Image (cartoon, rainbow, N blue to C red):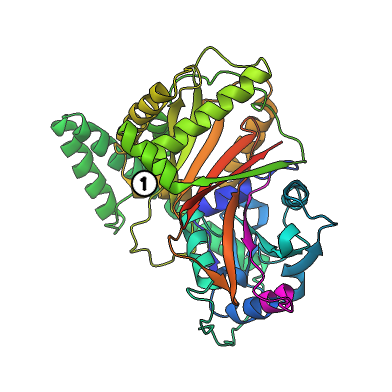
Amino acid sequence: MKQLTGLDATFLYMETENTYGHVNGLAIYERPSPDFDPYAIVRERYSTVIGHLEPYRRRVVEVPFGLDHPYWIADPDFDLDYHVREIGLAPPGAADQLAEQVARIIGRPMDRRHPLWEVYVIEGLEDGRWAILSKTHHATIDGASGVMMMQLLNDDAPDSEWPFPPVEWVPDQVPTEGELLRKAISHLVSNPVKAAGLQLRIIRNLAESNGLTSVGEVATRTRRLLSSAVGRSDEATATDEQLEAVSVPPVQAPPTPWNARVGPHRRFAMRSTSLSNIKRLKEATGGTVNDVVMAVCAGALREYLLRHEALPDEPLQAMVPVSIRTGDEADPWTNRVSSIIAELPTDSDDPLERVARCRTAMEGAKRQFELVPADALAEATDYTSPVVATAAVRLVARLSNRVNLPVNVVISNVPGPRKPLYFGGAKLDHYIPVSTISDNVGLNITVHSYEDQLDFGLVSD
């Protein structure tokens, strides 16, 4: 039994009847031979990987009354047939039919009585190809760990031998309410001390970053005295209020059609482009690949809003997830992600200007981000009450049609493998990310690189 981190648990607390915490990926494969059976090999492969990859066998156990963050347990009632499913498209199996099927599946919440993942083998695509839609809760993985899982489940060559033999694993007993309450009380006793040390550490870092060394020294000494008083010497991390002060601009984002309360239904669209072309644009403009991706998104959103006579005079604001993984994490199957907010120059009709402004905006957002230690951004939520976190989500939902948040759209750029991957001999052609939306931020654009291409996945209400 292992407790979720505060950040992992946040993706559970964010869920409402219309807002879901799962993220998804659509992998499209060639068919290596006419008699190739995708469902059979997918089911066989997942049946053997369960014992090797912890996220596939663990489910959530909630603490009574929401007094503390939930726990993962190895599911004593695990049923592979619940998780691996097969569906088919009606002829001709066109791309818009696939997109509609994906939108339907991602528009359903996940059942917390089971491990939080589902896999759909989709047959009937035109030209004989087939697909895997993976649906995994964000409480389990982030974008970087999702890429790791994808690479582990795929092969480096069409004739590679599957390296994971079946492994026996031991399910956990479901803990009693009394056991969970005793753990919660123990954590509640220690959290006020952790939070106090946390605030002092942030004050020290912000003071020193602005040259106020005397303030920083006082905060450091005070934090050490506090730690020694309770027999602790560990470093603490950031509070929610301080994170907001550093990461979120003190302005409201301009209104757009998708900045409203979301319903239960989803739309999904996908497009691909050449990574080589993006790199040529990067070299010609002096930006980065991410600057060009941001500018491409800004241009597309500008065109869309112009067509609908809804383009604001002010630039949009984009939330950009940032991985804070170091490679030294003891547990790779957890969230190590934060975010920055950057201006999106939708008010400019010049594509070169958009790239330049995206570069400037991203550089400024990164400087703000660096004022707080990366580990602080991830661990601050460990000290937030689940009851308070859930209530905050409900409040945002109620206010979403009355108040503009500082964000219009989420844009994420996830680097993927540059070499081809195979699933039991079937070559992976595309991996399209299919992310999630929330109240008042009803549009998500996620980009994933694979070989020499960028696959764009757009999700909206």
457 is higher (above) or lower (below) than 428: above
Q: Position of residue 352 (x, y in %)?
A: 39, 24
In reply to whether residue 312 is colored magenta, the answer given is no
What's the residue at 59%, 52% (across, down)? 432
Q: Position of residue 218 (x, y in %)?
A: 18, 37
Span shown in magenta: 20-42
Judge whether residue 121 can be spotted in this image: yes
Q: Which quadrant is the C terminus positioned in?
A: top right
Q: Position of residue 274 (x, y in %)?
A: 48, 47
Q: Which residue corresponds to mark 1?
A: 376
What's the residue at 29%, 36% (across, down)? 371
For residue 278, what is the image quadrant? top left
Q: Which quadrant is the N terminus positioned in?
A: bottom right
Q: 280 or 169, which is in the foreground?
A: 280
For residue 170, what is the image quadrant? bottom right
In-image side of 143 versus 224 (left or right): right
